[in-house]
């Protein structure tokens, strides 16, 4: 059992603005005095120090009323502090010391500060430690006036709950309920997470398929570019060969054309000489593109000399041949220009 060994107050209610200490020994302790001497204020000081913040349970209108008001001629206190020293030999409180001192300080600004062995501590942490040792200001460990009458009038179910609070069963029930709630919340979160994981997996599979398709597409495009380059390179090679051959043929044809023109002039001169020797009348009808005259003759002797020939047009077929090769050269030059401008790979 955890026992109170000492109570220290300063500036609390009517107990004065100086430090008031009350040492308590083992066994039954009774505090006596006339009405209004402050016996109940000691009870209120214990409840206040253990964390009670309800003004009505501390018998005041507001918490600031707990500060010493100065009496008739004294000065009002700006703060109050209550300390309780507990016997912890049995280590009911999870602190490895024999005596545990709990303190609470209240300022006139409403600020509350809690201390454990003169070290600041948060209220919720302190109350958790007190619950472990079954110390609660609202339980029957501290019984205010009229409390026993209220307990005697409770229903059996409420009495059972009160007893469970005293022995510490209720706090485990609360922890169990809280743990079950947390477990249910965790199950719901786990289901949601599992569903999201499934969706993410499906999306990953889709993205992986798209990635593989993209890689395959890039490989095929690379192969296509390589094949196009090979085809164009082969075509260019053949075109270069054809151009070289055509250039040689063009030179040969030009040589033949010069020879033909030379022979043509000789033939025309011979014809003119023969016509002149036979007293034939010659009339120039028009001129051909290669300056070859078309002759019109009306003498039957000339017809015998030239047979059925009415005009001489020697180089007509030759013009067609030269025109074909010129067009072929233009087409080849167009391919080279496209390659220089990167229009083809």
Image: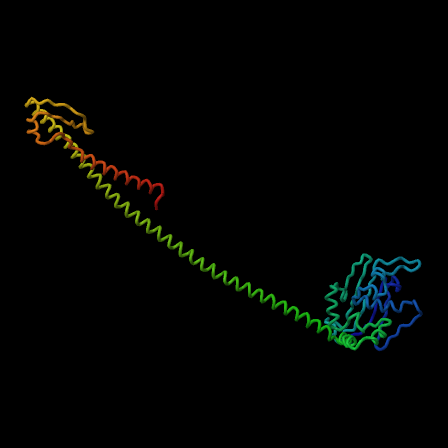
Q: How is the image coloured?
A: rainbow
Q: Position of residue 29 (x, y in %)?
A: 86, 75
Q: Nearer the viewer, residue 118 or 189?
A: 189
Q: Is 204 positioned to the left or the right of 269 in the image?
A: right
Image height check: is 25 above or below 283? below
Task: Measuring from the top left, give residue 223's x and y in whole percent.
Answer: 35, 53
Can you say whether 322 is above or below 210 in the image? above
Query: Which residue occupies the foreground of this view, 275 or 164?
Result: 275
Question: Where 289 sits versus 13, above or below?
Answer: above
Residue 326, image quadrant: top left
Residue, x 26% and y 43% (percent of image)?
A: 240
Q: In the rendered image, which quarter is residue 309 located in?
A: top left
Q: In this rendering, is residue 26 above or below 114?
A: below
Q: Is residue 43 left or right of residue 175?
A: right
Nearest the eye: 17 or 300 = 300
Please name the residue shown 79% across and 77% down the image. Answer: 156
């Amino acid at each position: 059992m955890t026992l109170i060994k000492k109570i220290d107050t300063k500036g609390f209610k009517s107990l004065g603005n100086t430090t008031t200490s009350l040492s308590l020994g083992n066994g039954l302790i009774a505090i006596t005095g006339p009405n209004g001497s402050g016996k109940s204020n000691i009870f209120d000081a214990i409840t206040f120090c253990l964390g009670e913040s309800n003004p009505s349970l501390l018998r005041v209108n507001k918490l600031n009323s707990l500060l010493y008001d100065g009496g008739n001629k004294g000065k009002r206190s700006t703060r109050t502090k209550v300390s309780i020293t507990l016997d912890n030999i049995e280590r009911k409180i999870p602190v490895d010391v024999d005596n545990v001192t709990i303190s609470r300080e209240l300022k006139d600004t409403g600020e509350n500060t809690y201390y454990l062995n003169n070290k600041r501590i948060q209220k919720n942490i302190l109350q958790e430690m007190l619950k472990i040792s079954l110390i609660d200001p609202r339980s029957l460990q501290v019984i205010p006036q009229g409390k026993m009458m209220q307990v005697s009038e409770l229903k059996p179910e409420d009495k059972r709950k009160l007893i469970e609070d005293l022995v510490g069963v209720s706090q485990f029930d609360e922890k169990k309920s809280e743990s079950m709630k947390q477990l249910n919340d965790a199950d719901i979160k786990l289901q949601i997470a599992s569903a999201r994981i499934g969706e993410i997996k499906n999306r990953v599979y889709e993205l992986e398929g798209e990635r593989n398709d993209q890689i395959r597409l890039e490989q095929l495009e690379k192969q296509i570019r390589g094949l196009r380059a090979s085809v164009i390179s082969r075509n260019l090679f053949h075109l270069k060969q054809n151009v070289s051959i055509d250039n040689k043929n063009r030179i040969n044809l030009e040589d033949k054309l010069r020879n033909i023109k030379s022979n043509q002039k000789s033939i025309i001169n011979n014809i003119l000489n023969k016509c002149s020797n036979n007293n034939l009348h010659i009339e120039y009808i028009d001129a051909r593109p290669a300056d070859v005259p078309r002759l019109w003759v009306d003498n039957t002797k000339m017809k015998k000399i030239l047979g059925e020939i009415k005009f001489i047009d020697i180089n007509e077929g030759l013009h067609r041949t030269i025109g074909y090769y010129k067009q072929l050269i233009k087409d080849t030059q167009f391919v080279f220009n496209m390659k220089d401008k990167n229009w083809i790979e």
